[in-house]
Amino acid sequence: MKVYFLGTGTSTGVPEIGCSCEVCCSNNPKDNRLRASALIEIEGKHILIDCGPDFRIQMLRVLKQTSFQNIDGVLLTHEHYDHVGGLDDLRVFSHRQDVNIYAEKYVVDAIKDRIPYCFRENKYPGVPNLRMNTIDENTAFHVSGIQVIPIRLMHGKLPILGYRIGNMAYLTDMKTIEDKEYNKLKGLDVLIINALRTKEHISHQSLNEALEQIGKINPAKAYIIHMSHSFGLHEEVQKQLPHNVLIAYDGHSFNV
């Protein structure tokens, strides 16, 4: 399995528009973060996790590293725009076949409300062909033969999903997780988990909260994602972290 970090930032991205803080003004490309998304390459298949408004530029970047023509499935964590705003750009991947989208019912309903032109009986030529698949938090499913295990997370008061594929789990935008879900996270080689900033937030984990979860889940290695400009400079924060906890950055890829 190979994981590509397409974006590692929060909803505003980094740099944030109009901000002159040291992170937003940093010359280190690791401090520039598009909206959070990842591409999983496994057994010749390609699975996208979230499809935010930066999807087009993210694809142009990743296709310089690897060449493929099909996205076999898109896993949506929740309905917020920074995670679904690029769905229209899937049109280039739906010329040969429909693109399968996997999400909870409330997310499926939200997508159909926001881009209804994709689901009309007589669609305008060229719009993306999206096939919506409703999933349940308690039921594993398969994307082109690859097993995916949904994990219930709480984004403040909003229920969202994380996903486990093989020995890798991707958890974004979480604040809390129910005790019963930890069983789904045993024996991980890699945990990808969110940490918005150093200070506590109402609906996202802080860095300390993320480190506590990493300690509890106990993966072999962890990557931090979904960071704001208040997270701090990549190089400075990395020095403070345990050896097996790495700050993810846009464009980075690794094998599991």
Image (spheres, rainbow, N blue to C red):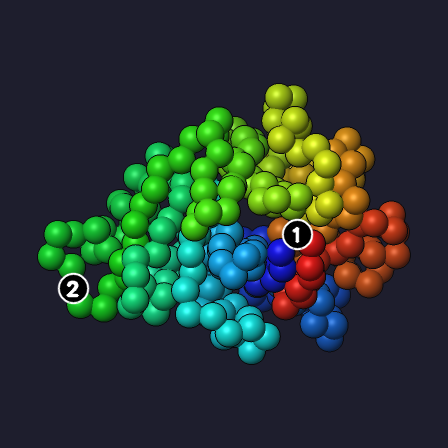
Horizontal relation, residue 133 to residue 164: left or right: left
Q: What residue do we see at 73% from left, 45% from top?
A: 189
Q: Residue 220 appears in which quarter of the rendering?
A: top right
Residue designated by label 1: 225
Q: Secondary structure at mark 2?
A: loop
Q: Position of residue 190 (x, y in %)?
A: 71, 47
The x and y percentages for residue 226 are 62, 51
Look at mark 2 in the image and give the residue it sits on.
Answer: 124
Query: What is the three-letter code of the residue carrying label 1?
Result: Ile
Nearer to me, 252 or 195:
252
For the question of whether residue 108 can be seen, the reply is yes
Report whether residue 172 is seen: no
Image coords of residue 117 (percent x, y): 21, 56
Q: Is residue 57 left or right of residue 170?
A: left
Q: Is residue 115 left or right of residue 215?
A: left
Kind of residue indicated by mark 2:
Tyr
